[in-house]
Amino acid sequence: MSWTTVCKTDQVQEDFPYSAKIDGKEIGVYVLDGDYYALEDVCPHAYALLSQGFVEDGQVECPLHEATFDIRTGKCLREPADRDLHVYPVRIIDNEVQLQTSEES
């Protein structure tokens, strides 16, 4: 398994996710109740970074058209988005947030 460090834990706040670009993928890193989550950061409805959207009650709302997603699962909760978001495995090592962005063959 290959892990990539994307940021320090103190760079992610509940109201202010961290936006990263890794291997050409835009990924939003969130913290909820001390647990870290990483999701595809581009809304599937129209290009907008979800990490710039409104975060509340474990959900993120797209800043353009109000599509809403569950941060823990990536599940699409409200249209106009038409699919769930990809969720990336996260681990914390020495206060660094690390993601696994590619699948093993």
Image (cartoon, rainbow, N blue to C red):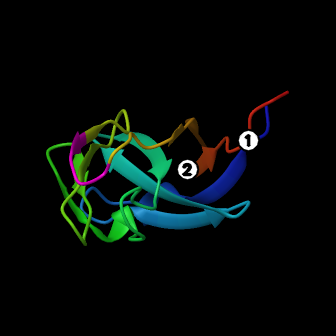
| Residue drawn at 73 percent across, 41 percent down | 102
Looking at this view, is 23 or 76 the one in front? 76
Main secondary structure of the magenta stretch = loop
The picture quadrant where one finds residue 72 is: top left
Say which amino acid is labelled 2.
Answer: Asn
* In the depicted structure, whether residue 17 falls above or below residue 96: below
Please give the label number shown on residue 95.
2
CA–CA distance in space, label 1 to label 2? 22 Å
| Residue drawn at 36 percent across, 59 percent down | 45
Residue position for label 1: 102
The picture quadrant where one finds residue 24 is: bottom right
Label 1 crowd (10 A; few <14 / some 14-19 / many >=20): few
* In the depicted structure, whether residue 48 falls above or below residue 86: below
Instruction: Locate residue 101 relative to residue 104 in the image: left or right.
Output: left
Q: Are marks 1 and 2 in contact (CB under 8 Å)?
A: no
- Residue 79 shown in magenta: yes
| Residue drawn at 38 percent across, 67 percent down | 46
Q: Which residues are magenta?
A: 77-81
Instruction: Estimate the x, y position of residue 76 in percent, counting from the top left.
Output: 29, 41
